[in-house]
Amino acid sequence: MSKLIIEIETLKAGQPRAYADSVYEYLITVKNYWESTTGLREGSFSQKEQDIKYLVKTFSRHFEDEPKCWADARLSAFEKIDFRTFRITIIEPYTD
């Protein structure tokens, strides 16, 4: 038996000032555990970048990998902090 725990922490959400682009920043942690004969143990499996992007698009904020329009939300930064923690920044242009 195995267990997967996904944590998405919102670090920033919204406009930093009037008439500015909206900034969304998330810290995503994916922990996996597996059952061994000695009990539940933490695994060292690291998620792929595309899987992390899918989690953010599904549970937090949708963005385009390749924006087709200037008004589309876009991925600004993708940083791997350790084997199970990632920081993602999404920029959504201001539209009036």
Image: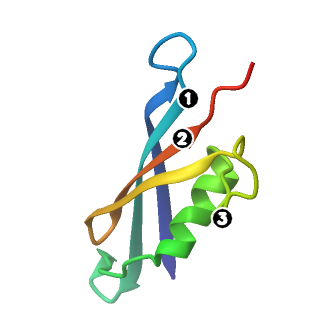
Relative image position of residue 57 (x, y in whole percent): 65, 55
> Which residue extends farthest front?
70
Give the residue pinned by disc 1: 22
- Amino acid type, mark 3: Glu
Q: Give the numbered dot on residue 44.
A: none
Mark count:
3
Residue drawn at x 53%, y 54% is 75
Describe the element under mark 2 as helix, strand or loop. Answer: strand
- Residues under numbered marks 3 and 2 in contact, where contact means CB atoms less than 8 Å apart: no
Mark 3 residue crowding within 10 angstroms, few (<14) / some (14–19) / many (20+): few
- Residues under numbered marks 2 and 1 in contact, where contact means CB atoms less than 8 Å apart: yes
Q: In this view of the protein, which residue sits in the foreground, 12 or 90?
A: 90
Q: Give the numbered dot on residue 91.
A: 2
Relative image position of residue 45 (x, y in whole percent): 36, 82
Residue drawn at x 66%, y 52% is 63
In the picture, measured across the screen, residue 96 lies left or right of residue 94, that is right
Label 2 vs 1, first from the N-terminus: 1
Label 1 vs 3, first from the N-terminus: 1
Give the residue pinned by disc 3: 66
Mark 1 residue crowding within 10 angstroms, few (<14) / some (14–19) / many (20+): some
In the picture, measured across the screen, residue 43 lies left or right of residue 94, that is left
Q: Quadrant of the C terminus?
A: top right
Describe the element under mark 3 as helix, strand or loop. Answer: loop
- Amino acid type, mark 1: Ser
Relative image position of residue 69 (x, y in whole percent): 75, 50
Quote the CA–CA distance across marks 3 and 2. Answer: 13 Å
- Amino acid type, mark 2: Ile
Quote the CA–CA distance across marks 2 and 1. Answer: 6 Å
